[in-house]
Amino acid sequence: MTADRGSQTVIARGAGSNALSFVIRFAARASFLYVGARLYGAANYGVFTMASAMVELAVPIASLGLKRMIFPWLEETTPDTAPRSATHVLLDALLLAAIAGIAVSMLLVLGAQALPDGLVSESLRLALALIAPAVLGQITGDVALAATRWTHKMRYEVIARGLVEPYVLTAVAFGAWYLGFEQTGMIIGYWAGSIALALFSVWSARHCLGPLGLRRWRPHPAELLRRARALAPASGSDFLTTLAQRIDLYLVGFLLGDAAVGVYGVLRQLRTPILQVRQAFDGILTPLTARTMMTDGDIATGKATAAATRVILTIQLGVVLLMAATGEALLDLFGAHYAGGYAALLAMVLAETVNGAFGVSELILYYRRPALALQVNLILIVIAGFAIPLLTPAYGILGAALAMLLAALVASFMRRHWLSGLGVRPHPFHAAIPVLAAGAAVLLGMWLGGLAKGTALMGAHPVVTKAVSPLIALLFYAGFVMIWRKAQPGVLSLNRYRVS
């Protein structure tokens, strides 16, 4: 029981710290959305969205998968006979990432100039060339913050990702707009946020792991080269994961132009709470999955990830109902032309729910069969690559969102199929209860909401009448979940993870 409580406590603290970070960060995102979408305009915001998304695509290549793969390296330092200290392992990882980051940023600059005129505007070409070197700041932050998570201290990532980076970005972008840098102001803000992130992250890692010992650090080129080769599958998996998560954005930008991708980018930012439910658990579950696999094996780890899927899905579905209630009102804040994206926002939210909850078990593939993890993301990319060009001419950004929902559903089935080959076979309906509860709550909400609109809410403000059905559904859903937990104690427990 003590070990069970320990697992629950460590995961709850880690997820809670990350959740606090995401609440703070979403407040910063909301501020930045106002600055970008309202002050800079849809076209300029679209240029920045595409340029920053290209940096985010380059980061997994430059970081060599070390955001996750540094954990097995650090685990090797725990015995007394360990050849290297944890801080020197971190310095090795940062050196590898820096070398890769320089090469990738140079390729990004050259690629920006080589893109054909019909595909990108001159504004986007300039933005890509200016923003590319910021890859170095982002990868430094990723690797150093991963080292802090290894020590189960999540507050540094909360501060770095929730306060330092987003608020520096927002403040500098607003100042740049005020000074008249209407075309490059958001790029300047991104640079400032990346530098602040890198500096704070390295300081945080030193505080968690101890003095860096730079005078005693001697990198071993042959060993680093061997490790770099071993990281290739993980890096490729991270790259394809990032591409799969953003391919809709790239295709919308290339097919529909800067202004359309600006609107689409706002929708993607508003669906952030769904994404952040998964990310709140990711920071602590990633190292614990590696540790559980090492000590208890794949089958036990599969049971642990299945439990995590139930927990994450239960929370996400509540957020989906909340987004359905408030999404249209949020879009109205950015201008009348954004309100037309409400249906696309709902499709995005559902796609992210499927990817987030049912993608937890992919960590097992990531560590055991990286090639299969690559194939999951290849499926997402191929489906999106075919479906988005087919659907966007007729349905615009809604077509792109529906294509990503289809891709997420197919990928979840393929992921389950490949995990069964490792002996990881959770019950097919292990996560069915929250889905059924959400479906029943939606039906009740529609029925009672319709009654309320014709009686008590007749003549009420349109915002109220649109939100009443999802809000009723949310209340019923919360009630269903409470009954489920009482009927099956421990069904939302995460005590199968190995903490130590």
Image (spheres, rainbow, N blue to C red):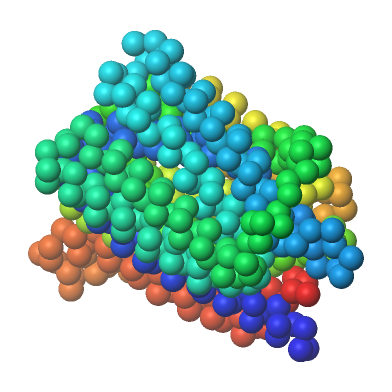
Q: Which residue lies at the image location 43% right of the left edge and 67% below the top edge?
A: 159
Between 232 and 486, the residue placed more toward the observer is 232
- Residue 476 horizontal side relative to residue 178, left or right: right
**Residue 219 sits above or below residue 90 on the image:** above
Q: Position of residue 273 (x, y in %)?
A: 42, 59
Check the image and name the residue furthest to the front: 215
Q: Is residue 486 above or below residue 199?
A: below
The N terminus lies in which quarter of the figure?
A: bottom right
Placement of 68 over or under 307, stated as above or below:
above
State which quarter of the image contains the C terminus. bottom right
In-image side of 443 versus 423 (left or right): left
Give the image location of residue 388, x and y in percent: 46, 26
Q: Nearer the viewer, residue 37 or 81?
A: 81
Residue 277 makes an appearance in the image: no
Place residue 286 in its image quadrant. bottom right
Residue 154 visible in the picture: yes
Q: Residue at x 59, y 26 (%)?
A: 382
Q: Position of residue 179 (x, y in %)?
A: 12, 43
Residue visible at 40% across and 74% down in the picture: 475
> Is residue 204 or residue 380 the one in the foreground?
204
Provide residue 216's location: percent of width, then percent of height. Answer: 71, 57
